[in-house]
Image (cartoon, grey):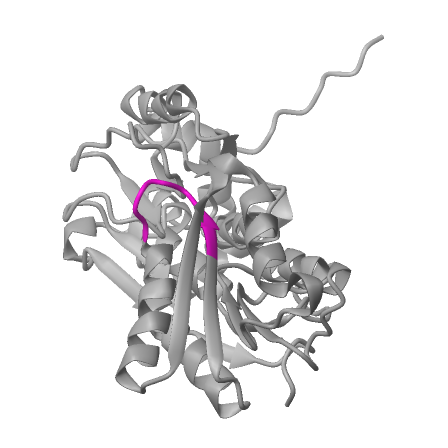
């Protein structure tokens, strides 16, 4: 004799147990305001019966998936990985899922993500991308990180210009007289380019000697190492303070200088940008750095994407940065 499998509880069962109308139960589970006593009765009944909301089915009925795609070039850069972690956490708190798309700057991969939105497979996109061929219509639910695409697409970024200014001022305060800005990055313009602009603007306004060198990341790091060798090899010390566009570049610059017998921070002081820490967000900094508010950037991007009216968001949201010493400056 086989035992009959018990049915899963339904919303009608919850309504009967709570002694309320079925419409009241529906309102509670769909986030529509009801009186506190009604809500408490519904939740208590659902808990007693073991009823759980099928968010996937509810999303299909509402023509929503409760899923957001995150586009990143890679996750082998620690800033990208940290951003993905915070965005996933922010979405989870809002009962949404995240689909991570690693594009390696391939426009075809980005186009597939955009098509997923148009086919209602995901509800929207948060994108950090430097593809020159990116084609996003203003009607698409899209929030950009670190790149202004169009006035109709909100961009969330740290205050890169001010971050560069802070780095220049700090190096000057610490006694540096000959400053250098080093940048590796995409050939496509983005908000991160303002780091060098803020750095050189502060130097020009304050009469501090400054040189800026920008390298295309498609060329790799060899041109950077060759440049450093010309200015620090064979006992040369052409600069005593360096601001690097990322912490990763700062770390590699330090290693290159030390191979040339240059001591950091005794001979040369270095400041990076990002605020990356070893192992996790609580570890030691890799270098003295301009710290991006990564968690706040993630929360802001998610809030804008899931808001009822994205048109109310500014075209560019710049969040404040801070400086933190991390061993490559002489505090």
Q: Is residue 45 left or right of residue 5?
A: left
Q: Indicate the quadrant where residue 312 lies.
A: bottom left
Residue 139 seen from this side: yes
Q: Residue at x 54, y 73 (%)?
A: 239
Specify whether residue 294 is painted magenta.
Answer: no
Specify whether residue 187 is painted magenta.
Answer: yes
Q: Quadrant of the N terminus?
A: top right
Q: Is residue 297 left or right of residue 237?
A: left
Q: Indicate the quadrant where residue 206 lies.
A: bottom left
Give the total number of marks visible in the rendering.
0
Q: Residue furthest right?
A: 1
Rendering coords of residue 161 (x, y %)? 32, 69
Rendering coords of residue 106 (x, y %)? 43, 24
Relative to residue 38, is residue 19 depicted above or below? above
Relative to residue 236, is residue 8 depicted above or below? above
Q: Nearer the viewer, residue 301 or 147?
A: 147
Q: Residue furthest front?
A: 234
Start and end of the magenta stretch? 183-190
Rendering coords of residue 67 (x, y %)? 43, 35
Rendering coords of residue 246 (x, y %)? 53, 59
Q: Nearer the viewer, residue 58 or 109?
A: 109
Q: Residue at x 36, y 52 (%)?
A: 146
Q: Quadrant of the C terminus?
A: bottom right
């Amino acid at each position: 004799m086989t035992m009959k499998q018990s049915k899963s509880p339904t919303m009608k069962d919850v309504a009967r147990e709570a002694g309320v109308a079925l419409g009241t139960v529906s309102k509670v589970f769909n986030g529509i305001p009801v009186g506190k006593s009604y809500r408490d009765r519904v939740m208590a009944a659902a808990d007693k019966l073991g009823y759980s909301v099928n968010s996937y089915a509810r999303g299909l009925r509402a023509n929503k998936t409760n899923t957001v795609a995150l586009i990143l070039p890679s996750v082998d850069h620690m800033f990208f990985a940290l951003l993905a972690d915070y965005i996933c956490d922010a979405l989870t708190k809002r009962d949404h899922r995240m689909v991570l798309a690693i594009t390696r700057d391939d426009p075809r991969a980005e186009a597939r993500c955009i098509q997923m939105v148009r086919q209602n497979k995901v509800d929207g996109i948060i994108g950090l991308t430097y593809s020159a061929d990116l084609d996003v219509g203003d009607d698409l639910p899209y929030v950009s990180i670190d790149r202004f695409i169009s006035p109709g697409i909100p961009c969330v970024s740290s205050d890169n210009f001010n971050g560069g200014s802070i780095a220049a001022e700090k190096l000057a305060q610490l006694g540096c007289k000959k400053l250098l800005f080093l940048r590796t990055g995409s050939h496509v313009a983005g908000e991160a380019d303002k780091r060098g602009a803020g750095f050189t603007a502060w130097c020009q306004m304050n009469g501090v000697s400054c040189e800026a060198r920008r390298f295309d990341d498609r060329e790799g790091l060899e041109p950077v190492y060759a440049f450093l060798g010309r200015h620090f090899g064979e006992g040369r010390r052409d600069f005593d303070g360096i601001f690097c566009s990322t912490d990763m570049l700062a770390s590699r610059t330090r290693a290159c200088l030390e191979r040339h017998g240059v001591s950091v921070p005794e001979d040369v002081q270095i400041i990076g940008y990002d605020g990356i820490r070893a192992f996790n967000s609580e570890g030691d900094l890799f270098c003295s750095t301009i710290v991006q508010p990564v968690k706040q950037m993630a929360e802001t991007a998610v809030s804008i994407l899931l808001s009822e009216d994205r048109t109310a968001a500014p075209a560019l949201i710049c969040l404040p940065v801070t400086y933190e010493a991390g061993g490559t400056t002489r505090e």
